[in-house]
Amino acid sequence: MPKTLKNAAVAASSSWTDPDGVRLPAGEVHAWERGTNQTVCGLPLHRSALGRFSHVTWADVQPATGRDADEVARVCPRCAAGMGARRDERPWTRTNPRP
């Protein structure tokens, strides 16, 4: 059974500093499990030149609801799937069944 992550941090391609002086992720963001050297989708952090943001959670960088998503340009779809992005959506149903 695959391991599910609940408290993943963020790795991003660039960063920005908010008016309070806190460094936040920008550009493309990936889910990253603390203590490892790769993202959930398998990219190595150092070779991909991704910066670690251990103080920012994955839920905080989602463009629809996140508080730290002001400069996020793209969320990695493979990391989103690994974090269970479709889990809360309604299941698919047929609206016009065949006879």
Image: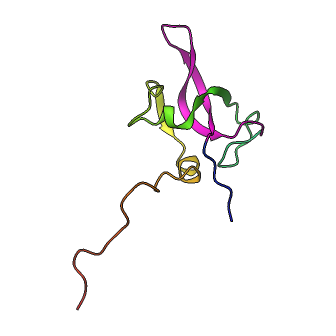
Residue 45 or residue 58, whichever sits in front: 58
Quarter location, residue 39: top right
Q: Quadrant of the C terminus?
A: bottom left
User: Residue at image x 32%, y 72%?
Assistant: 93
Colour mapping used in the image: rainbow
User: Residue at image x 53%, y 48%?
Assistant: 80
User: Which residues make up the magenta segment?
Assistant: 7-36
Q: Residue 64: x and y, percent?
A: 38, 37
Q: Is residue 31 magenta?
A: yes
From the viewer's perspective, tell me whether residue 63 is left or right of residue 1. left
From the viewer's perspective, tell me whether residue 95 is left or right of residue 66. left
Q: Quadrant of the N terminus?
A: bottom right
Q: Is residue 94 above or below residue 82?
A: below
Q: Residue 18: x and y, percent?
A: 50, 12
Q: Residue 53: x and y, percent?
A: 64, 26
Q: Is residue 4 above or below residue 49?
A: below
Q: Main secondary structure of the magenta part?
A: strand
Residue lying furthest front in this view? 6
From the viewer's perspective, tell me whether residue 32 is left or right of residue 74. right
From the viewer's perspective, tell me whether residue 47 is left or right of residue 58. right
Q: Residue 13: x and y, percent?
A: 61, 30
Report the number of discs: 0
Residue 53 or residue 15, whichever sits in front: 53
Quarter location, residue 44: top right
User: Residue at image x 60%, y 39%?
Assistant: 30
Residue lying furthest bottom in this view? 99
User: Residue at image x 51%, y 7%?
Assistant: 20
Quarter location, residue 98: bottom left
Q: Is residue 95 above or below residue 90?
A: below
Q: Is residue 12 magenta?
A: yes
